[in-house]
Each structure stands twice: as C-alpha cells, then as structure tokens.
Image: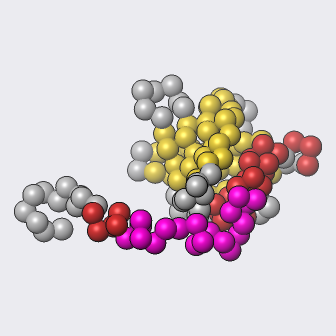
Amino acid sequence: MHTIIERELDIELVLSAERSVPVPARLVYRSNDPFAVHVTFHIGSDVPVHWTFARDLLVEGVFRPCGEGDVRVWPSGPDSRRVIFFALRSPDGDALLKAPAPVVSAWLERTLRVVPPGEETDQIDAEECLFALLTARPADDGGDGRP
C-alpha cells in the first residue's frame, strides 16, 4: 500500500522586493515515488502548473541554499518569520516563490517518517518500473522511426 501526503498552502509569488501575490499551491509526496516531491500551483489559468523535483533538494534547502539550474531552494529570515524561497526556471520563464518554513518543514517531516532517508529504494517496485519502461509509447519523433 502506498501513502500520499498532501498539504494545501498559499505560496507567495515574489514580483519585486516590495510586492508579492499569494498563489494557492499543493505539496504532494507519494511513497511509491519516494525520491520526488510534487508541487502544483493554481495560478488562475485553466491548467495548473506542476513542478517535480528531488525531495533531498527540499530537505537540504530548509537548512541552507542548494540546487542548480532549474530549481534552487534556500531558507531566509529570523526564526519567528522563517521562509523558504524557491527559484524556478523553465523555457516559459522564471519565478521566485516563498513559502512559510514551518508549514513546509512540518509537511516534509511527515514524508520523512513515511519513507526515511536511505530507504527510498525499498519503496520502488522494480518489476513495475521495468514494465513501465518496456511498454512506454515512444515520443512523437516525426513518424519516420528516427530520433
């Protein structure tokens, strides 16, 4: 049986040093996908924005700056007002977001109780993964069979 841990929260989209807007978001962790965390942002469009990145990145980012490239995470602020910043980069643009550290940390601790660090591979069904790889449909490559 797999466990799903979800948490709804408002994350602030930082527009400038003086201005940010709340963005409803959902943090999701699935024990059958133990290395990943999923974040869905509801930005008022027909389709929400989904991001997936390593749980280890978020665990480290609660304590110190980490990440390269598309996802960077770091803590900021005094203990009483601590926040976690997320810098996300995609071909569609960049976003700087901040979330309350106590909320993110509490959710993250729940994921670590369900699948402790170092036990992630125990949660993976190798046969299921192999089946998914072998039965995956090839990406649209133009139809001539060449990559």
Q: Which one is nearer the viewer's eye here, 85 or 138?
A: 138
Question: Is residue 15 among the parts visible in the rendering?
Answer: no
Name the side, left or right, on which 147 lies relative to 23: left
**At 78% across and 43% down in the image, what residue appears?**
103
Q: Is residue 9 magenta?
A: no
Q: Is residue 127 magenta?
A: yes
Of all residues, the one furthest to the front in this rendering is 1
**At 48% across and 34% down in the image, what residue appears?**
48
Q: Is residue 64 above or below residue 20?
A: below
- Quadrant containing the C terminus is bottom left
Question: Is residue 31 among the parts visible in the rendering?
Answer: yes
Name the side, left or right, on which 92 lies relative to 30: left
Residues in magenta?
112-130
- Corner quadrant of residue 2: bottom right
SS assignment for the magenta stretch, majority:
helix
Q: Which one is nearer the viewer's eye here, 137 or 21?
A: 137
**Total number of numbered discs in the rendering:** 0
Q: Percent from the top left, x then y, of residue 41? A: 55, 37
Q: Is residue 137 above or below residue 10?
A: below
Q: Is residue 124 above or below residue 1?
A: below
Q: Percent from the top left, x then y, of residue 142? A: 12, 57
